Amino acid sequence: MNFANLFRIALKALSNNKFRGFLTMLGIIIGVGSVITMLAIGQGSKKSIQAEISEMGSNMIMISPGAERRGGVRMSAEDMQTLKVKDFEDILNNCKYITLASPTVNASGQAVYGANNTPTSVTGVTRDYLDIRGYKVKDGDIFSDQDIHTSAKVCVVGKTVVDELFPDGESPVGKVIRFGSIPLRIVGVLESKGTNSMGQDQDNLMFAPYTTVMKRIQAVTYLQGITCSALSEEYTDKAIEEITAVLRDNHKLKDDAADDFNIRSQQELSSMMTSTSDMMSTLLAAVAAISLIVGGIGIMNIMYVSVTERTREIGLRMSIGAKSRDILAQFLIEATLLSVVGGLIGVLAGIIAAYVVKVLLSYPIAISTGSIILSFAVCTVIGIFFGWYPARKASNLDPIEALRYE
Amino acid sequence: MEKEVIRLENIKRDFKVGSEVVHALRGISFSITEGEFVTIMGTSGSGKSTLLNTLGCLDTPTSGEYYLDGVSVRSMNKDQRATLRNRKIGFVFQNYNLLAKTTAIENVELPLLYNPKYSKKERQEMAVEALKAVGLGDRLEHKSNQMSGGQMQRVAIARALVNNPAVILADEATGNLDTRTSFEVLVLFQKLHSEGRTIIFVTHNPEIASYSTRTITLRDGKVTSDEYNHNVLDAAEALSALPVEKD
């Protein structure tokens, strides 16, 4: 008895009961379909978060003052003042794995122009910052190194600020606005970046020379952070080592003292932010996998009924020369066909459902070939696993008893 | 001397029913040569079903030797017997046992599917030939549920013929048919017999016996008579003698 013949026999037996076969498959279809859809949604949200993070800048390393925060322990104000301008200069000049670096000093307040005003924040930076974070100047130009040197009262503004302060469509470049009590001349307007995945407006901001923000607006001598860019992604770890060495040296920390600063790379941020969506997709897939098992039990149930119902047929096949293993193979193939064909339809249904989700809910989706191959393999295993017991039962029938079965 | 197709030597078959042992066959010996048309008669409980199962290699005797076409069956395992049934035996059942919703040709080629020797084309050709032999050459694609009882039994006979078996075993093959159709089937069996086939017909109907060449009667697991029939009736004549039914 060759496999092709057995396959033909199984196919024939299934086609005699198409509707029942379809109902049996439905369990598998729903199971596989939901696995595919859930994984597509999970993967999609993960990918969109990752895209969002890489949009923030490339190979970014963020240094913040103070030791690593643990639990709810509040840091003293002194701890937050450990980063100085010299740290920034040393990092930029002495770390060979760092290409760009910029200090950051933040101030929130009200921007005013004529009768219009808007709440916003101004970040003191160097020119590098815009490159690290991927901001581009659309109109005018960015402030110069000279402006940084002289703490010039100039700024670059985001689109939201422009829209609020210049509702009539006036060109803002060259105009002088006030931030709090400090007048700042607009030298450039940023290209819009839109909102990020967390709903933050990335255009409601202003950039000014860090010296201006430190001296004229905040009147502080420390930095709130340093943002750097590593040579490339694989040098991120080396760059972090270098920065750590420079900062520990600058801060005169003893060997056994803990760092008084905190370094995070973009990769860490990315894995931190995707861990939630990873967990969600694992949970969704687990629920979907359970429905796949339920589908498998459905197959077992139907195959079991089918064996009882077709006892006479089994007896006949045995009497005309089918061996036990032929009967076993026939019923196993039937069960596997049900689950594999069900799986195939399920994959299609899952892809369609994922696209429906994408179109109707404008949710990001990503269908991975891995999930398709996986659910297909699982289907085959389920077919064999749940088909085994009924097939075994069929093959163990005594032909004499089976022929006499009413 | 003619070839011996079946040879039974003191066949005994015991069944255990609960704590009791039932002796279904109590030492049966006979042999059947090629081309015989044998009727095995017996009332229910006589052991004829057990004998049929033994002859059909579905069951193995408790003791005694059974040679089918010169091969000893008793020492064979399940798979070997399955292959032997596939090559040497054609079964015809009382209730036809055709596959539902399946065409005549597919039903007939079924035994060949379990023999890897035959290609798809050969199976088709052999099935068509067998169906022509039973007079159903024009109903190849009819499904089993579109046929009458007589037609279904003829498909079943074609299925028994298709592997060119050493012996055809018919179990009450006319039991579910009306008188006219029964005679039609008997005509067919006589035709196959005249073509040289060996046929064993198990029945409790004494009428059938007069159309066969030899009658073996069983009672309580023993052969009580084994007679050659010197005056074989012609089933075709009996069929034409039947009153024509009018609706």
Image (cartoon, coloured by chain):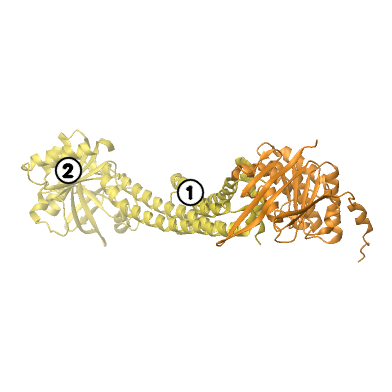
Chain colours: A yellow, B orange
The residue under the point 61% across, 55% down is: B14
**Mark 1 surroundings within 10 Å by alpha-carbon count, few (fewer than 14), some (14 through 19), many (20 or more):** some
Q: From where the camera sits, is residue B135 visible?
A: no
Q: Considering depth in this image, is A258 or A388 the residue closer to the camera?
A: A388
Residue A28 placement (x, y as % from top left)? 51, 55
Which amino acid does the dot numbered 1 rest on?
A: Val
Q: Chain of mark 2?
A: A
Q: Is residue A234 visible?
A: yes
What residue is at 40 percent from the left and 50 percent from the top? A43
Q: Return the disc, 2 or 1, that comes first in the chain's sequence.
A: 2
In the rendered image, the quadrant that contains the C terminus of chain A is: bottom right
In the figure, is residue A136 to the left or right of A351? left
- What residue is shown with label 1? A381
Vertical relation: A146 (above or below) B55: above
- Mark 2 Cα within 10 Å, few/some/many (few <14, many 20+)? many
Disc 2 target residue = A148
Farthest residue toward the top? A96
Q: Which residue occupies the foreground of this view, B18 or A72?
A: B18
Instruction: Pick the quarter of the image with the N terminus of chain A.
Output: top right
Relative image position of residue A42 (x, y in whole percent): 39, 53
In which chain is the residue bearing label 1?
A: A
Q: Picture coordinates of residue B182 (x, y %)? A: 83, 57
**Side of B235 where A20 appears, left or right:** left
Q: Amino acid at mark 2?
A: Ile
